[in-house]
Amino acid sequence: MKEAKKRKIYVALGIVFLAAVAGLYSYLYLIPSITDALTPTVTVEYGQLQTVEVAWCTVVREETVVYAQEAGEVSYYAQETEKTRKGTKVLDIYPPGSTGSAYTASVTGFVSYYLDGYEDFFKPDSMASLNGEILRSTSLTPKRTERQSAEKGDALFKLITSDIWYMVLSVPEEEKPAYRLNSTVTVEFAEGSVKASVSEVYDRAGDVLVILKTNRFFPEFARIRQQDVKIITSDYTGLILPESALAREGEETGAYVQSVDGSYRFVPVEVLTQSGGQVLVSADGGLRIYDTVLRNVDNDQEE
């Protein structure tokens, strides 16, 4: 009997403990969320709002591959991504029993020893003919070509001969409005990020081809061919509101701001961007940081 009572006591204490934990969790996490959602007003804050897209990116460069004209030992002089002037020696090949043959830069450009075999396929003058099916049919990872010896016909290095770099994206039709011609975007690679401008936008069957271009360089750019990237298509700072706080009066978009006496007045706003249930408006209008606005506006009932 005593053992049975002890077990009942232990069970009861366990239930009390679990109930206390559940209550504490609700207090710390659930109740604040519910309370916040039910609050009729929200305070205007200053912040940043980005619109980010994800895309399969193919890097296209003006590049020329140099091949070995004979077999032999190789000696290198130029470093990876070193910018060399026309006539600068890149490497020597020493065939057995003879003097070395010099390989120089035919034009000024960046030297790279990373090759993928598609240097003659992905060219700036043929980008417009690409489509999503072609771009997604390859998954290219360039390989480093430096070696102690080479055979005749081996690819030795490539020379990137332009300061303009291109990135070709295949994006869904619904994302097309995010890529406005001549607008500036930020492309985030695994190795770093670079700003670029939207150069061309082409409609393709089932998708949209977007061509970005930039003259900004970071060393890893010379070897990247294809990669999943993040594209920041808009990046604004201003005043942040929930989308539900936007109201309409006639042709104007605005928010209802609480006055000192508790009444509300309509204040027009300029919407810069919106994402994830939030909207960012210009700080140059009538709305001010720390203003109190109605959180949920029923626009169907507004005149």
Image: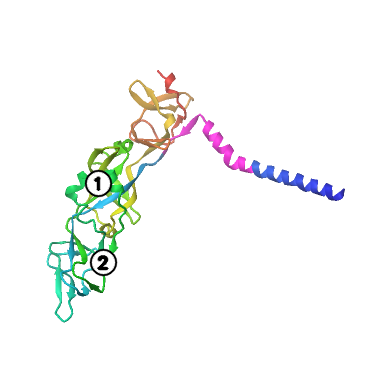
x, y percentage for residue 1?
87, 48
Instruction: Place residue 151 in its image quadrant.
Output: bottom left
Determine which residue is flagged by label 2: 145
- Bin the neighbour count of mark 1 within 10 Å (Cα to Cα): few under 14, some 14-19, many 20 and up: many
Q: Is 25 contained in the magenta span? A: yes
Q: Toward the viewer: 164 or 65? A: 65
x, y percentage for residue 95?
17, 77
Secondary structure beneath disc 1?
Answer: strand
Q: Up-down: is 4 above or below 219? A: above
Q: Residue at x 24, y 74 (%)?
A: 149
- Bin the neighbour count of mark 2 within 10 Å (Cα to Cα): few under 14, some 14-19, many 20 and up: some
- Can see residue 181? no
In the picture provided, is 267 more to the left or to the right than 42? left
Q: Up-down: is 156 above or below 260? A: below
Secondary structure beneath disc 2?
Answer: loop
Q: Toward the viewer: 182 or 118? A: 118
> Are the residues at dot 2 and dot 1 in contact (C-beta closer than 8 Å)?
no
Determine which residue is flagged by label 1: 212
User: At label 1, which amino acid type do we have?
Assistant: Leu
Q: CA–CA distance between discs 2 and 1?
A: 28 Å
Q: Toward the viewer: 60 or 69? A: 69
- Can see residue 20? yes
User: At label 2, which amino acid type do we have?
Assistant: Thr
In the picture provided, is 270 more to the left or to the right than 299? left
Magenta residues span 24-45
